[in-house]
Image: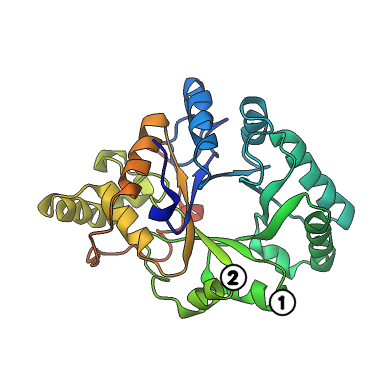
Amino acid sequence: MKIASNKLDFKIIIGTANFGSKYGTEKLSKVFPYSDLEIIFDDIRKNPNIFIDTASAYINSELLIGKIAPFSLEKRIMTKITINPHDTFFSVVGNIEKSLENVKQNKLFSVLIHNASFINFTNASEIIRGLQHCQDIGITNSIGVSCYDASEIINIKKRFSLFTNFQLPENVVDRRNFKNQNLIDLKIDNNEIYLRSVFLQGTLLSELNQLPNCLYPSKKIFENLEIFCKENNISKLKYCLDYARSIGWNSGMVFGIQNFNQYKEILKELERPITLHNFPTEVLDTVSVDPRNWTYEE
């Protein structure tokens, strides 16, 4: 199936955190089947609107991309690098060059800083200089930051205007930024903000008995969401995707997937029109909605 570009005004971005190792909650985490990797990369090659999201911190992910899809995803891979207080211009450039070598492409679409807290490091200007150098010499098309809160994007953009790509979590149980005018203005001003955590690490699509124990106090929210979908004869997948596609600042969506069949199911749903315009189900509190606060004692 090839997605017609005139049907979508955003990028589809396939997350690869589980391509080389388990990622996410203990009950839901699975390594992406190796037998599906060649199939999915072959399909992605045929769809110019589909991109790849990876990171140096994702175990084996970059190396698997380079092994299975070398020199075939030019300018369609975004990777993330983690910055520490001891990084220099040279270490940043070296890390980006290493990622490019790992994925075996001639140029990346984007390089994002994995930890937005770098803005408070004393070496922040060195980091920026390294990133800008990589953009100037053509290693990457664009640079940006992966954030957890809209305020991080706003503050970083004010200080460093050269950043044009961002990632931000948002989903039907975390609707803090649905109509965030600051983010909409950034998109209008030619910045791209990519929505991640659309399925909240798979919990929004899972069976209720698969929720991590730390979310059990909020189980009623997931139950009511399931009831709403059943009463309105829609899938939870559609509910999540229609919400994500309704966000005005959304330039693209990062999806974590468990296998090739789920990937095709998502693409098929994205070809259909948005029919939901109201999302009345409850939201999680600001602590529970952030996977960094989750514990995995089972």
Relative horizontal placement of residue 3, taking residue 159 as reference (left or right): left
Viewport quadrant of the N terminus: top left
Q: Position of residue 297 (x, y in %)?
A: 43, 41
Look at mark 1 in the image and give the residue it sits on: 159
Q: Quadrant of the C terminus?
A: top left
Crowd band around label 2 with a 10 angstrom C-alpha radius: few (<14), some (14–19), many (20+): few
Q: Position of residue 83 (x, y in %)?
A: 74, 55
Left or right: where 73 falls relative to 195: right
Q: Within the image, what quadrant is residue 190 found in?
A: bottom right
Q: Is residue 130 above or below residue 96?
A: below
The image shows residue 169 at horizontal and vertical percentages of 47, 59
Q: Is residue 27 visible?
A: no
Q: Is residue 232 visible?
A: yes
- Of circles 1 and 2, the one toward us is 2
Look at 65% across and 58% down and name the residue there.
115
Q: Which residue is denoted by mark 2 in the rendering?
A: 190
- x 69%, y 59%: residue: 143
Q: Using the numbered discs, state the Cα–Cα distance from disc 1 to disc 2 in whole angstroms.
A: 17 Å
Residue 155, compared with residue 18, is above or below; it is below
Query: Of helix, strand and loop, which one carries label 2?
Result: loop
Q: Amino acid at mark 1?
A: Arg
In the displayed structure, does residue 76 sit left or right of residue 127?
A: left
Q: Secondary structure at mark 1?
A: helix
Residue 174 picture location, percent across and down: 38, 63
Q: Amino acid at mark 2?
A: Asn
Foreground of the two, 6 or 238: 6
Q: Earlier in the sequence, mark 1 or mark 2?
A: 1
Q: Residues within 10 Å of mark 1 (few under 14, many from 20)?
A: few
